[in-house]
Amino acid sequence: MTQAYSTLALAEPLQRAVAEMGYENMTPIQAQAIPVVLTGKDVMGAAQTGTGKTAAFALPLLQRLLKHENASASPARHPVRALVLLPTRELADQVAQQIALYAKYTRLRSTVVFGGMDMKPQTLELKKGVEVLVATPGRLLDHIEAKNAVLGQVEYVVLDEADRMLDIGFLPDLQRILSYLPKQRTTLLFSATFSPEIKRLAGSYLQDPITIEVARPNETASTVEQRFFSVDGDDKRRAIRKILKERELRQAFIFVNSKLGCARLARALERDGLKTAALHGDKSQDERLKALEAFKAGEVDLLVCTDVAARGLDIKDVPAVFNHDVPFNAEDYVHRIGRTGRAGASGLAVTLVAGSDTRLVTDIEKLIKKKIELEPIELDDERPRGRFNDGQRAWREESGGDAPRAPARSARHGGHRAAAASRDPFFDRPYEPAAATSDKASWEAMPRPTPARGSISANIKPRRKVAALFKAPAPAAQA
DNA sequence: AAAAAAC
C-alpha cells in the first residue's frame, strides 16, 4: 500500500534531495498526485491539511522541467517556466524554501517575490533568471508591470490554497496575472477545502482536468482532537489558560477574527505572564517574520494570529490550536486547526464559542460532517484580571498617560525575570495586578514574580461573588 | 461581523 519515493521515475538529483530530507514513503496525496502531474495534465487536488501537498506538486513539476528542458526554444537563458501563487507572504516564503531544497542538486533556479520587502533584491534575482517563480499576487503584478518578470514562457502555473486564490478578494489580481501567461499551459490547483461553487469556478480555469481527492474535501485530519467549549468574553482567556495548564501544552496557535482583537489578546496574554507573539497583516513584514521565527524557535509559547496564519504554515509539532473567535468561514476552521496534528502527529483544537456564535458552529458542523458537542467549561477562580486591565486602559485614555505602576514586584516577591524565564509552569502564579506599561522595553525589563507554590484555585471564592464585586467600578478605573 | 494581497 505504501509506496517509496525510490520507486518513482524521478531524476537522480531529485531522488537525492528527497532522500537527504529523510523522506521515504509517499503520503496518499503524493502517491496519487505525483504520477498524474508527471503526465503534464491539469489537476485539481484535495487532501487533508498536513499531508504533504507541496511535495505532491513540486517534485513532479521539477521533474518535468528537467526532462523537457529544451522544449521551449527561448531567447532568454532562464525564462520563468513555472509559476507558483500563494495567498500569504509567509506561505510563499515557506513553499519557496521547500522548492529550493528539492531543486538543490539540479540546475534549475527558483526565487520568491512578495510584498512588504524591498523590490530591489527581488528584481536582481528575477533579472538573473529563474525557472521557478513563487509569489504572492500583488507584488508579482508590480514586477510584471516593471518588466522585471516576464511570464510569456510559463508552462506550468500552480495555485496553492486554490480556493482562497479564486475567492473574490484575490480573483481580480489572479485574472490579471493569468492574462500574461500563455493559454497553452498546465494548471494545477491544490487545497484542503473546495466549496461546490469554487469547484465550479475552478473548472473554468482548467482544461480536461484530473481530479484527485484523497478522502473527502473539507475533511479534518483524524489526528486532531476537536473540542468546543461554551464561554464568553474575558472568560475565554481564562479558559485558554486553564486548558494550556491542564493539558500541559507547550505551545499553541491562538486564532482571532480581527487584527485589533489580535493585538489586544496578545497584549493581555503577555500581561498574564505568557510568552506571546502577535501575527497579523498590520505588522511590518519584519515583525511578521520575527514572530513566526520566535515561535518556531520556541522563544514564544503562544502565537496569537489572524487568518493570515490559517493556511499552509508548516511548523513541526504544534500541539494545539485555539479558536478564541469562531471563524466566519467554516473553511477557515478546517485550515486553522490544520496547523496542528500534521504529518501524523496528534493535535488538539479548541474552539471557544460565545452565545452569538451558534450559527457559525452549525456551518462548521455541516462542512466537516461531524457532530459537534458544545461543552461547558469549569473555570478555576481567579481575580478578573481582564477587567482590571480595562480599568488601566480607561485611565490611560482619560489622562493621556499611563496608569500608576503597581508597586515593584521584586519588593514583594524577591522574584526576578530569570526565575520566571525558567520553564516552570507559568500558570501557577498568584493574582498580580498588572502593571501598566509605557513601552515594550520597560515591560521586558520589569522583574517577574517567582512562580507560586500553590495553585490559583487554592484561594477560591465563588465566581459569582467575584463578578458581583465588579458591578461597582473596578478600583483601578477610579485612579 | 474580517483578513489577505502593492506602493
Image: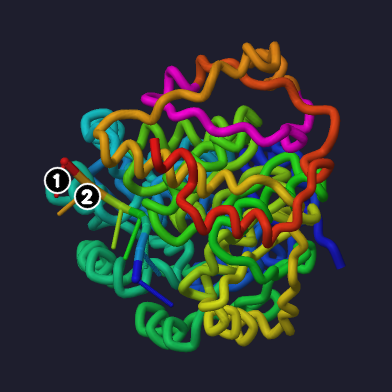
Majority SS type along the magenta span: loop
Q: Which residue type carries mark 2?
A: Val
Q: Secondary structure at mark 1?
A: loop
Determine the residue positioned at 32% across, 71% down: A184
Q: Hey, which quadrant is residue A420 in on the image?
A: top right
Label 2, on which residue?
A150
Q: Is the C-beta separation of discs 1 and 2 under 8 Å? A: yes
Q: Nearer the viewer, residue A213 or A50?
A: A50
Colouring style: rainbow
Looking at the image, residue A135 lies above or below residue A400: below
What is the span of residues highlighted in magenta in the rendered image?
A423-443
A285 magenta-colored: no
Q: Amino acid at mark 1?
A: Lys
Mark 1 and mark 2 on one chain: yes
Position of A44 relative to A401 (above/below): below
Question: Dividing the image into 4 quarters, which one contains the C terminus of chain A?
Answer: top left
Name the secondary structure under disc 2.
Answer: loop
Residue A86 location (% of width, % of height): 41, 56
**Residue found at x 53% / y 73%:** A331
Foreground of the two, A235 or A196: A235
Which numbered marker is on residue A375?
none
Q: Point out which mark residue A147 bears.
A: 1
Residue A377, given in percent of the width and then of the height, sits at 75, 65
- Give percent across and percent down for residue A60: 57, 57
Mark yes or no: residue A226 visible.
yes
Q: Is residue A138 above or below residue A289?
A: below
- Label 2 lies in what chain? A
Query: Crowdedness of circle 2 by 10 Å Cα count: few (<14), some, many (20+)?
Result: some
